[in-house]
Image: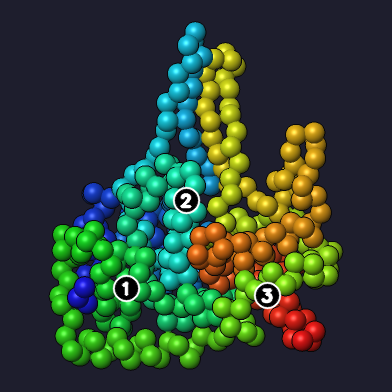
Amino acid sequence: MSLWIVEKQEMSAFVANMMGDYRVVGPLAKGAKFAFGPIEDPADLRLDYNTSILPPKKYLQPPEERMMTFKRNGKTTVETVIDAEPTVIWGVHTCDLQAMRVLDEAFSQGYPDAHYLRRRRRTLLVGIECREPCDEHSFCKSMGTLSASRGYDLHLTDLGETYAVDVGSEEGATLLEKYSRARLATEGDMQRLNKVLGAKWPRFPYKLEFDVGELPALMRQSYNSPLWDELAQDCLACGQCTLVCPTCFCFNVYDEIELNLQDGERRRRWDSCQLDEFARVAGDENFRKYQAARLRHRFMRKGRYLIKKYGELGCVGCGRCARSCLVDISPVGVFNDLHRVKVKEA
Ligand code: SF4
Ligand code: SF4
């Protein structure tokens, strides 16, 4: 599809024009950090944010949601509840776009998840090309998510006075046509875009000491590595790393019953494989009793299990887990340590 240009001074009107038809959300300043939230004033939208505390996946898989209500007045009745407001998410970084592809696969395969899929169908994604690394923790270049050619409805690149807008879907084209005063890019705009994209690559360092294509095999070979026990000595089992991760999607389902013991609702909320009770089952058995096993499971999912099952790696290099871990356990550190051991043994 063609490339379009929106003047920066017209972005606020573009956002404001769609606010009557959609819930519009995007990155907002939150103290010294940024968080995705509802846009009430388009001037608050911070497309220049570095990273967000939680990824925008929270609009597709909310931290907590009601799934159904039930009544037991003689005969039991059940009503599915799906909250799926038409939403436009502005300012999704390319790593988070890729993470949503992982979620799309996970929630579509096996038993398709009606809650996620209804929301996903009603959500439009406006991506933004990062021109600088978020900070020292991001390793998107190593994970192949530094740029995106799909997975968005519109994708913006900051060209200084204007944004270049790539259209990724029919719905994106409609957004542009209906709410903006975009013009077709000229030859000069294309040259500027190429210059901006060319200049960004050297600014991002490779953090992995090997090619990411080798990661699944490395993880398979590292299943019995002593590193898992070593990391477990430090790990606090707090679960923070999984809660901020854009590709983690595990949840816990539970029922809440009214005092009348007749009415209730089924809910679910994010869960973490790093918590002791995650794998506790009937009879008080725990099939991942030790933190070493839980850490290994987390990294196996990131580097091996998800690509085997869904065709996409489970880590997109956003660095949020490393940023939030109090004891400095990071995917880059773990993957490189495992790689160094393999090189030494070869
Ligand atoms: S790796 Fe870090 S963030 Fe994750 S559970 Fe352990 S201490 Fe918490
Ligand atoms: S494992 Fe860490 S770096 Fe990788 S996607 Fe999840 S939060 Fe981001």
Q: Residues within 10 Å of mark 3 (few under 14, many from 20)?
A: some
Separation of marks 2 and 3 at Cα, in angstroms: 26 Å
Circle 3 sits on which residue?
A: 218
Circle 1 sits on which residue?
A: 156
Locate residue 243, reporting x and y percent. 60, 55
Q: Earlier in the sequence, mark 3 or mark 1?
A: 1
Query: Does any atom of ligand 2 lie closer than 8 Å to the CB of label 2?
Result: no
Q: Using the rendered image of the protein, determine whether residue 43 is visible from the camera's viewpoint.
A: no
Q: Earlier in the sequence, mark 2 or mark 3?
A: 2
Residue closest to the eye, 294 or 15: 294
Q: Residues within 10 Å of mark 2 (few under 14, many from 20)?
A: few
Q: Secondary structure at mark 3?
A: helix
Look at the numbered discs 2 and 3 and tell me whether their residues touch, using CB distance below 8 Å.
no
Rendered view: 68 above or below 150: above
Q: Secondary structure at mark 1?
A: strand
Residue closest to the eye, 219 or 252: 219
Disc on res. 85: none
Locate residue 333, reporting x and y percent. 70, 76
As shown in the figure, which amino acid type bears the numbered disc 2?
Answer: Gln
Discs 2/1, front: 2
Q: Secondary structure at mark 2?
A: loop
Instruction: Name the residue: 77% across, 58% down.
Output: 293
Locate residue 110, reporting x and y percent. 49, 47
Q: Using the rendered image of the protein, determine whether residue 200 is visible from the camera's viewpoint.
A: yes
Separation of marks 2 and 1 at Cα, in angstroms: 30 Å
